[in-house]
Amino acid sequence: IAGITQAPTSQILAAGRRMTLRCTQDMRHNAMYWYRQDLGLGLRLIHYSNTAGTTGKGEVPDGYSVSRANTDDFPLTLASAVPSQTSVYFCASSDASGGASNEQFFGPGTRLTVL
Amino acid sequence: GQNIDQPTEMTATEGAIVQINCTYQTSGFNGLFWYQQHAGEAPTFLSYNVLDGLEEKGRFSSFLSRSKGYSYLLLKELQMKDSASYLCAVKDSNYQLIWGAGTKLIIKP
């Protein structure tokens, strides 16, 4: 693999179900991020991780959890999905060691529909 | 609060020049990014500005005025493939990106 991969590509989920969105990068980036993108709104940060073993809350963390057991993987879990979590989810990574100028690289996204 | 403003939609003609503006109010400033996002795809990096002035990269240029909280992305010699959304984002005092809602650019032949 090259870059960032996300799985699944899309998913329809019943409300109340648990769901894990997967994200894997092979660029050895230390920082990883989860965003949601909704029509008419900017990308909103859900959770982030500056390095393996640490995570932090973003702008909209409620209803979501993450873990960062190693450098490459950063799964996002919805413990009990609700319709307001219907969105496109993007995972991103960056080499934060270089300072503020390092851009974020994005995965292809997961389109999630909660009914 | 933190806020990034950019026009919702713009239309331009193939071969022409278009300027997409972005104004921001954020807690701290550690640089401004422009990304391009084609429909149904992921955002991809275009430019980064941290000092005032113009950064040129081929057909695309980006300008920053920190005192005015203002940036623009200039696209020259427009091509049909430039039809996309253009996202402005500011890195705040916590080194997190604050994103604008994006400007959808429509290119007409």
Image: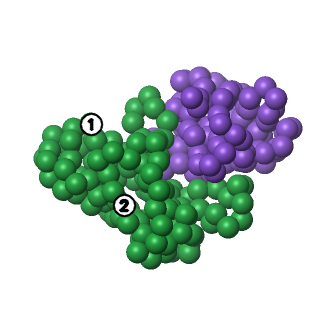
Can you see residue B47?
yes
Find residue A21 and report its image quarter: bottom left
In the image, what residue type sits under mark 2? Val
Up/down of B84 relative to A30, above or below: above
Q: Which chain has been coloured green in this picture?
A: A
Residue A10 placed where, x, y %?
A: 28, 53
Q: Which residue is drawn at 36% across and 61% down?
A: A66
Residue A92 placed where, x, y %?
A: 50, 58
In the image, what residue type sits under mark 1? Ser
Q: How far apart are marks 1 and 2 (CA)?
A: 19 Å
Please give the residue where the numbered disc 2 appears in the rendered image: A66
Q: Which chain has been coloured purple in this picture?
A: B
In the picture, the quarter occupied by the C terminus of chain A is top left
Can you see residue B40?
no
Q: Residue at x 71, y 41 (%)?
A: B29
Up/down of A67 relative to B47, above or below: below
Please give the residue where the numbered disc 1 appears in the rendered image: A84
* CB under 8 Å between discs 1 and 2: no
